[in-house]
Each structure stands twice: as C-alpha cells, then as structure tokens.
Image (cartoon, helix red, strand yellow):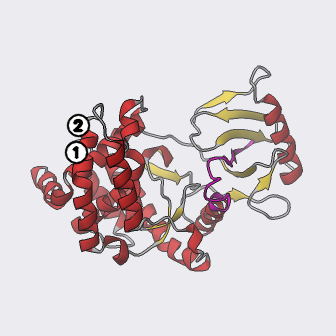
Amino acid sequence: MKTIEVNKNLKEFNDINNLCNSINRSYQIKIDNISIIDGGFLHKKYLITSKSVKYVVKVLNNIKFQDVSIDFPINAIKYQNYLQKNRVLVPGVIPNIQGELYSINQKGEYYFLQECIDGNILESNQLTLNQIKLVGENIAQIHLISSEFTKMNNNKKYKKIKNYKILQEEAQKREVEINDSSTEKIKMVVEKQNEIIEDIKKLGLIEELDYSYIHNDLTVDNIIIEGDSLKSIVDFEMSRVNSPLQDVGRFLLTISFDGKNFNNEKIKAFIKGYNKFYNIGLEDIVKALQIVWINESGIWLTDKLYHIYNPPKVQKFMSELEWITDNWFVLKEKLESDINEKK
C-alpha cells in the first residue's frame, strides 16, 4: 500500500483538514497522522493513525455513482461488514458514534473507516499455488455467505445483470462506431458479436444462473498477501448482485491467462480451494468466462479505447475480452488443450 504524505502544498489540504475534523466528530478519533493512499481509481483513500492504531478512510466518489445512486456503495459497505462478522478474511468496517457504518463530511461526501490490513499486493505471476488455493477457498466462502445477505437485502435495484436488449444495444453501438480507422481487433468483435449473443440466448446463460452479492472487482489488486498466506480480500465498493461465476472468471483471467494460454496449475489450485465449499469443474470455468464477456464486453470492447492510451491493466482487460470473443465457440476445447498440454 503506497502512501503519500500530506503537506500544505497539496491543493486538497483544506479538504483533508475538514475530513480530519469530521472523523474526530463522527468517530471521536483524534488523528495523529494522515497520508494519501496512492492509486485510488474510484475513491479517495487515506491512511490515518491514532494512538498507534491504523485505519483506512475511503471517501466515496459521488460523481462516479450519480447514475445509480450512492445507495450502491453504501449497501456494499454493509455487505463487507456482514462478511467480516461471519469471519471471512475482509477488513472490518468501523461504526461511527451513532452506530452507522458510514458518515458524511462537510462537502456532503460519504466516507467510511475500515481496519488497515498490513501485507503485500503481488503481481499475478508472483502468487504461489497455495496462495491461489486460499483465495479460491475464501471466494467460495464469500459466495456461500452472500446467499444469506442477498435474501436479507433483496432489492432489485442492487442487481447488475444484463439482459439481451442491453447486449444488443451494446453491439449496435459498436457497429455504428466502426470506421476506416478502426483496428482489426474491434472489427473482429463486431463481426462475431451478434452470433455470440444468439448463442447466449440459445444456452439460456442469463436465465439459468443463480444470482447473489459478489465482490465484482476481483483482481490481484484487491488481494492482500502475507508470507504464503492470504491476509485479506479488499475493496468491496463495486459489489452488486450478479452471478458468482463473474468473480471466478475475472480472477482466473487475472492470474492464469497470459494472453494466449491458461496456466493449468493455477486453475487447479483455485478449483481445489473453491471446492472446499462448492463443486466446480471445467464446464463452470467455461461458463465463468462467458459471464465475464456478458458483463464486461460493453466496457472494454469499444472503438474509442483502441484510439487512446490505456494503462496496462485496461490493456489486459481488453485482450482478455478479445480472446473470449475470438474463441467463444471453442472455449471448452481451448481450456482442455491447455490442461492436457501441461499435465
């Protein structure tokens, strides 16, 4: 976790000072030190220290959620807290003096405090098989416990599930955007997308799935490791109701796919851990990749992204979705081939 010390030259000094005052009032915590946590994509994040106890403060990005309501991340905070109370390896959320899991600062921004989890965030190629197994085990535990939370919070507005109409609208938008300067990759997507959507209908993928709360942003960036063990899974603000296979597919793509092939040993390690609570196999992994395409193709496969600079993480997302598109009808055979070649 990289931090930057706060000083008076920073433009946001006043905002940080007001935040400190708000924390003092709402939590009765006197802050000895505060530093910015670098790399907050969605929200501003700070590390505070009070009497040698460290907390992470997250200030929610109201603009980012203006289309779907701030209720989404607020409910995600409650979801995280529920998981921690059920002994899942996630950071505990600190209630304020009113017992609420979030507070509002002078600018009207929502924020919350959580435990600071010490450890390391590793690159995907640095994770050991034992660490991957433990992540699989804890993801399955999250999915198991999530079913109960979903029953208690059965509000349709928290669902993030695409239907065929949305998929077709995304496809039509890509077709309209294609022009002479479009890359061969996005042209390939446009060529195959309608056939894929028809196959999704034929398979009944959207209708047949079980849905519950999921992490919904499960990459190595949100996994904290200590030694050869899993310390915590973090960053639940994107949690929504969707298929648990989304988490499975997103994580396996992140840690086992190199752009052309899958690492069989890593897949097996994940499955071994996940199967402590559920039984999944090759068919489920194929379905997980298909679910990732349904949920993410509209985000990462757009003509615009092929004409601008994208950070490495976004480039990887794009290449993963391109590969699924190109191999949609032979996903099982491709996975079997990788597995057989590496036995």
**Up-down: is 140 above or below 342?**
below
- Residue designated by label 2: 184
| In the image: residue 163, left or right of residue 188 | right
| Vertical comparison of 71 with 52: above or below | below
Q: Residues within 10 Å of mark 1 (few under 14, many from 20)?
A: few
Mark 1 lies on a secondary structure that is: helix
Q: CA distance from mark 1 to mark 2?
A: 6 Å
Tell whether 297 sits left or right of 190. Answer: right
Of residue 234 and residue 193, the one placed in the foreground of this image is: 193
Q: Answer whether residue 224 is visible to the viewer in this image.
A: no
Q: Which residues are drawn in magenta?
A: 51-73
Tell me: 69 left or right of 133: right
The image position of residue 22, as x and y in percent, is 85, 46
Q: Position of residue 202 (x, y in %)?
A: 24, 73
Of residues 132 and 168, the one drawn nearer to the viewer in this rendering: 168
Question: Is 150 inside the magenta-drawn segment?
Answer: no
Q: Which mark is residue 337?
A: none
Task: Name the residue beneath numbered marker 1.
Answer: 188
Q: Nearer the viewer, residue 307 or 107?
A: 307
Q: Position of residue 60 (x, y in %)?
A: 68, 48
Compared across the picture, whether 110 is left or right of 287 comes to right
Residue 61 pos. (x, y %): 66, 46
User: What residue is shown at x 13% (from left), y 59% (from top)?
Assistant: 333
- In the rendered image, the quadrant that contains the N terminus is top right
